[in-house]
Image (tube, rainbow, N blue to C red):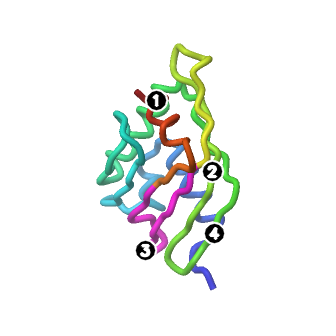
Amino acid sequence: MALITVEQVAAAYAALASGDRTRMLELWHEDMHWLVPGHNRLSGWKNNVDEFMQFMADVGRLSENSFRMDTVVVNLTEDSSADVTRNTGHRAGEPDRRLDIDVIHWMRWRDGKVYEARGAIFGDGTAQYDAFWS
């Protein structure tokens, strides 16, 4: 039986989207690590909540807050979750420069909070992702 719930995963993403550090720390370990895939200015490890929140702020700024992650499915185990999302948006000032990719996020949980996560992009989406953020 999974100890992590779909509701916890949704709440973790809602806390992230809020941009509220206090709310983030309810579901994310302060020293969490997240690997952003690809080879672009946003890629690489985010090594704590503040770095991860800055990454998300950059995503918002660079996409005129058009970036969306729509959940397709969530899979759970006792200490991890994997969710598939459709990520869409457009670049700031360039509404015709669009992103539309499928992504999986694998998150490891401890004490009801995410402490490590990695994103992976399906198919040629990585090339699209890199071109979009370049």
The numbered disc on residue 131 is 1
Q: Is residue 21 magenta?
A: no
- Quarter occupied by the N terminus: bottom right
**Disc 2 and disc 1 in contact, CB within 8 angstroms:** no
**Disc 4 and disc 2 in contact, CB within 8 angstroms:** no
Q: Residue 106: x, y in percent? A: 50, 63
Q: Considering the numbered disc 3 on the image, is that residue within a helix, a strand or a loop?
A: strand
* Residue 54 visible (yes or no): no
Disc 3 versus disc 2: distance between alpha carbons? Answer: 23 Å
**Could you say which quadrant of the image residue 110 lies in?**
bottom left
Q: Which residue is mark 4?
A: 75
Disc 1 versus disc 4: distance between alpha carbons? Answer: 29 Å
Q: Considering the numbered disc 2 on the image, is that residue within a helix, a strand or a loop?
A: strand
| Residue type highlighted by circle 2 | Thr
Q: Which residue is mark 3?
A: 110
Q: Earlier in the sequence, mark 4 or mark 2?
A: 4
Q: In the image, which residues are magenta? A: 103-118
Nearest-to-viewer mark from 2 and 1: 1
Above-or-below relation of 79 to 127: below
